[in-house]
Image (cartoon, grey):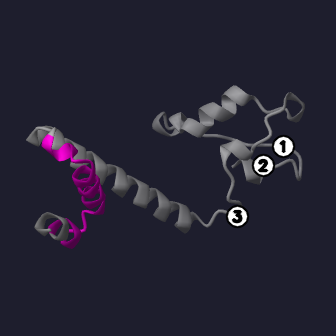
């Protein structure tokens, strides 16, 4: 189809995938032009954001591939669950706040970071 090939040529991969999904579900007929365009633009924006994040993550070359779900947040370890979950949202970035992680050797500072 012409629209799909144009989206691919323009490197609008998020819009292309969203367009294909709209066609498969036939929801494109139920949306107004502005609603459909807004949906396609949102998909492209999310795709670019995801690709940028993945590129930054690859370039960072993190020593550990860890996630918040892997942390053991027992009280005995001295980790505040609320604080850790708050850090996971990244709200400290928007506020331009610094985070300092300290502890004894081998307690998991690098893993936490």
What percent of the width, then of the height, locates residue 25? 27, 48
Which-is-in-front pick, marks 1 and 2?
2
Q: Specify whether residue 51 is in view.
A: yes
Q: CA distance from mark 3 to mark 1?
A: 18 Å
What percent of the width, then of the height, locates residue 23? 22, 53
Which-is-in-front pick, marks 3 and 1?
3
What percent of the width, then of the height, locates residue 69? 69, 43
- The image quadrant of residue 39 is top left
Q: CA distance from mark 2 to mark 3?
A: 12 Å
Residue that appears at 46% across and 56% down:
53
Q: Is residue 20 magenta?
A: yes
Give me the disc on residue 63.
Answer: 3
Residue that appears at 60% across and 39% down:
88
Decide: few, some or many residues near mark 2? Use Cα within 10 Å; few <14, some 14-19, many ≥20.
few
The secondary structure that most of the magenta stretch takes on is: helix
Give me the disc on residue 103.
Answer: 1
SS label for mark 2? helix
Left-right relation of 39 to 65? left
Residue that appears at 89% across and 46% down:
104
Q: Specify whether residue 37 is in view.
A: no
SS label for mark 3? loop
Q: CA distance from mark 1 to mark 2?
A: 7 Å
Please report the bounds of the magenta region as a residue range. Answer: 6-29
Residue that appears at 22% across and 49% down:
40
Decide: few, some or many residues near mark 3? Use Cα within 10 Å; few <14, some 14-19, many ≥20.
few
Residue at mark 2 = 109
């Amino acid at each position: 189809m012409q629209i799909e090939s144009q989206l691919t040529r323009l490197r609008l991969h998020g819009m292309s995938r969203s367009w294909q999904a709209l066609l498969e579900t036939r929801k494109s007929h139920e949306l107004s032009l502005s609603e459909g365009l807004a949906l396609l633009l949102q998909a492209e924006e999310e795709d670019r954001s995801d690709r940028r994040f993945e590129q930054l993550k690859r370039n960072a070359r993190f020593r550990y591939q860890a996630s918040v779900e892997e942390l053991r947040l027992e009280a005995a370890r001295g980790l505040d669950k609320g604080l850790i979950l708050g850090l996971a949202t990244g709200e400290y970035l928007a506020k331009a706040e610094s985070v300092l992680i300290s502890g004894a050797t081998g307690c998991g500072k690098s893993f936490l970071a």
